[in-house]
Image: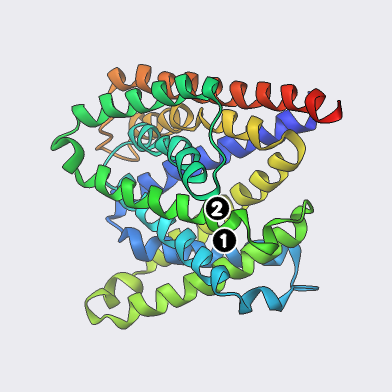
Amino acid sequence: MRASVLVTIGSVFAWAALAAANRILLLRFGLDPWTFTFVQMCAGGAALLATCGWGRLDLASFCRPATWVIGALRVLSAALYASVLARVSVLDSGILGAVNMSMVAVSIWLVFGRRPARCEWPGHVVIVISILLLVADLPGGLWNPAVLLMSLNEVCMVATTLLAERHPDNVSDDPRPRLQFTGALLLITAVLFLAVRTASGETMAAVWNWRLLVAGAAVGVALRAPSMLLTFWSIRLAGAQNYVAALSLLPLLGMVFEHSASIVGLIHVSHFEADNVPLALGVVAGTVLVVAARARMVRLAVPASSG
């Protein structure tokens, strides 16, 4: 089997395991999602730096305001997603999060003028319909806390994508400096967020809870850092389009991990609904349609540009 396939499969499994582990720990120990995420990002960033080293780190990058905005948005996005996982299953959170593909496509169209190809739209429609059917089934519908938190999460992710699109540190194809930069940025930004969180007296007990510190550090080193590492590696070997297509399987894999944890008694509140599996399959189908349409447009553009 090709290395690109193995690495991509490993990346999807790692992200699914991370989502499931977050949900299990949040529910089992009643951890504060925000503090838990900040500790996790600190540990994950430190682990990336330990892997790549501090050598030849371009300090000029940290002089750009956009760099700090990207770092803050990434940490906030992770914390918001953890808050969603404290409320709905990994399967449901994955379905809700699939709206990112359509939001990014529309945002890039509005900001940069790169209009999605006509053949992409059927895939986006399938994705959005699958999400709306899930939202309609949740208590409160669009006003459900999980939906509102995921909406904020997606705004953060879309803003990160738009800023990273033109950021100088996102130009290099070499994953090592990008991983090194990402690790340093996440570590510093998460430490700042953790300091602010700690400064508020009402959260002191939550911040210094030994379960939270141990769980956050362990998940950051064992799952978050490898997930980010495998993501960069997968995109380099398999390409961004194939990686995005594979990532659409994350809700289904996360469901398997969460359901297994429920069976063995690690969590007692799963909120898993078998009726939502077809919606996850709809997200997969829609994503594949979008990726296939983009790949087709690339193939058509190559002969045109060479001729």
Check disc 2 and report the residue beneath it.
Answer: 224
Residue 91, given in percent of the width and then of the height, sits at: 37, 31
Circles 1 and 2, Cβ within 8 Å, touching? The answer is yes
Check disc 1 and report the residue beneath it.
Answer: 44
Q: Nearer the viewer, residue 179 or 50?
A: 179
The residue at 67%/21% (across/down) is 296
Q: Earlier in the sequence, mark 1 or mark 2?
A: 1
Tell me, for residue 154, which label it has, or none. none
The residue at 60%/22% (across/down) is 293
Residue 294, given in percent of the width and then of the height, sits at: 62, 27
Q: What residue type is labelled 2?
A: Arg
Furthest residue toward front:
307
* Above/below status of 193 relative to 153: below
Residue 80, given in percent of the width and then of the height, sits at: 35, 54
Residue 33 visible in the current orientation: yes
The residue at 19%/32% (across/down) is 138
Residue 211 visible in the current orientation: no
* Above/below status of 239 relative to 173: above
Determine the CA span between mark 1 and mark 2.
6 Å
* Above/below status of 43 relative to 83: below
Q: SS at mark 2?
A: helix
* Above/below status of 1 relative to 57: above
